[in-house]
Image (spheres, rainbow, N blue to C red):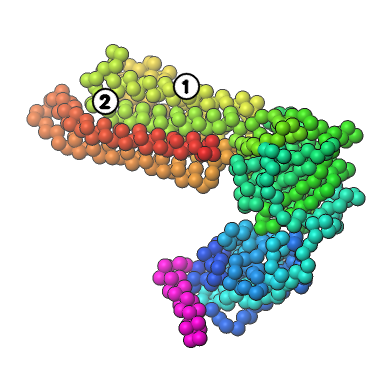
Amino acid sequence: MLQQMELPGLAFAVWMFICFYASVDSYPSGKIREACTSMIPCHGSSPQLSPEHTITVNGTEFKPGDNIEVHLSGPDFEGFFIQARDAEHLDSPAVGSFMLVDRKLSQLLTCGRIKNSAVSHTSKAKKKYIKVYWIAPGDAPKRVQFLATVVKKYKLFWVKIPGPVVSQPNVLSPTTPLHATSEAISTSHSVSYLSKPFNASGCGSMKFCIRNPSNCDPESASCFFLSFQEEKSSVFIEMSGPSEGYLAFALSHDQWMGGDDAYLCVNEDHRVHVSTAYLKGRSPPVLDSENVLEDVSWRLVDGILQCSFRRSISLPAYKGRFNLNASYYIFLADGEASEGGLIYKHRHQPLITNGVYNVTDLPQDIGGSRSPQLIKAHGALMFVAWITTVSIGVIVARFFKPVWSRSFLFGKEMWFQVHRMLMLTTVMLTSISFVLPFIYRGGWSQQAGFHPYLGCTVMALTIFQPLMAGFRPSRHAPRRQLFNWFHWSTGTTARILAVVTMFLGMDLPALDLPDPWDTYTMIGFVAWHVGIEILLEIHSYCLVRKVEVIEDDRVQILQSLTSAEAEGRLFKHVVLTIYVSGNIVFLIAFLAAINHI
């Protein structure tokens, strides 16, 4: 019995020791995922025993999908951390998810595998009152208790302040109707709550499925899922994905928004409303006043929104509703919605199928792409040009003149031929890549920020550089020094702007690169290239220091310098081999990211 009493105290002492000596500071930003399990802030002191703050709720019972108001109040406090847990096992993981009321004071955190399962502060600003909503999951335990950690000052805090217990008397039947307030579904059709999440069984054999990532599980927190199953004269549709606002799919005759048949599942005041809409250009969707959907059901658990409904294959009486026995491009999008149900533009590029499909034809299990093929090609060609050919060409011209000055290729010095070949390849790749976005967009993009402007500047410098090289003066001409300076400055400016342009382009939704991985990788490439140049510069400097000038004769100095540079031939070849190999690794990484390998 004594050992059982000592273990919790020992565990707490070890925890405090780690927090103190790991130099973990306070969390003024509220991003305290490290405290998800213990709810103990690493402030180097013990928690207080008698809490000054209270937790209140607006109800004592709940059923799956319900939202419960949770209030935290008391004397001024700087930080807080709220969770809901199984009342019978308070050391168990968090239960359910939260929704915010005031984003200036509170933010959502993901503890473990449950998205938005905790709420914390956003700053150290003093506050007296916090209000959030807790959303009951479908698999909630019978009794749930709310807990809060409150920080009044850095070393004055309370841990796991007990709050009210709410209970679930009965499990909600999947056919129990809910009262929907949306005009789009205020008809005689019943709306029910889904007691279980969707699954991918039957995909490719009984139903037509679209999944992103490919072959993902609809129950996972990162899977976007859309399925169609023909049943006599109707089609049963399921849609699922991680979203706190809305999910939507559309049938389109092309790969552009506009003139499309759309279907939306919108989280409005913690209830999901399902409606049809018509997309007109890039304007917000126009919701239909009449509902043509039947057997509507929904589920919102742990940040995953799911809805299902049935629609007749043919609806000739409803303008804007496409027949489902024809072939279309299929869009799948998600985004944020206000508490009044107003939806905002999707956060990233919608998923678009690579071709047209008939969802009532043979069942298939396909994926899609959030990045159009032309945009992928644009990014891939630019990466090839500015990560490999340009970088290697610059290294060769800068450091391999003395090494390859006596080697000839097609009648010219080898270093010059290699440099020219790489640079002309860059011009060709950049030119092809440059026109692809214009072909895809059909003109200028107004939503890409500074990226297209800088891209046009880089393209102009890329074309100007070889044109200027065509008028290069002879080696000993008086204007050769001026040409060398212009040639170097133009090339360097183009390279710097190209890197900046790629940084901006990687964050555009059309390319859909994994963030922040793409930024870190590009920073790594820049550091890699600069590091290699510095290494070769240091090597060249050391060789120059070895030159012994016997007479004050320019030719003899140049000969000695050339001899000294030749001594580093092996070193430079090794460095070049390593550099080219490294560039290929970076290129493969970027190409794999573009293609989501």
Q: Are marks 1 and 2 in contact (CB under 8 Å)?
A: no
As drawn, is 129 to the left or to the right of 579?
right
**Residue extending farthest top:** 411
Identify the residue shown where x is 49% and y is 30%.
382
Q: Is any atom of residue 287 visible in this view?
A: no
- Magenta stretch contains residue 23: yes
* Secondary element at tag 2: loop
- Residue 132 lies, in percent from the top left, at 70, 65
Magenta stretch, residue numbers = 1-25
* Horizontal and vertical percent position of residue 313: 83, 35
Residue 205, x across and y down, in percent = 69, 38
Measuring 52% from the left and 39% from the top, which residue is drawn there?
A: 597
> Amino acid under label 1?
Met
Name the secondary structure under disc 1: helix
Q: Nearer the viewer, residue 459 or 205?
A: 205
Query: Disc 1 versus disc 2: distance between alpha carbons?
Result: 25 Å
Indicate the amino acid at tag 2: Lys
Most foreground residue, 332 or 177: 177
Outermost residue toward the bottom in this view:
2
Name which of mark 1 and mark 2 comes first in the sequence. 2
Of labels 1 and 2, the one closer to you? 1
In the picture of the structure, the residue carrying the numbered disc 2 is 401
The residue identified by callout 1 is 428
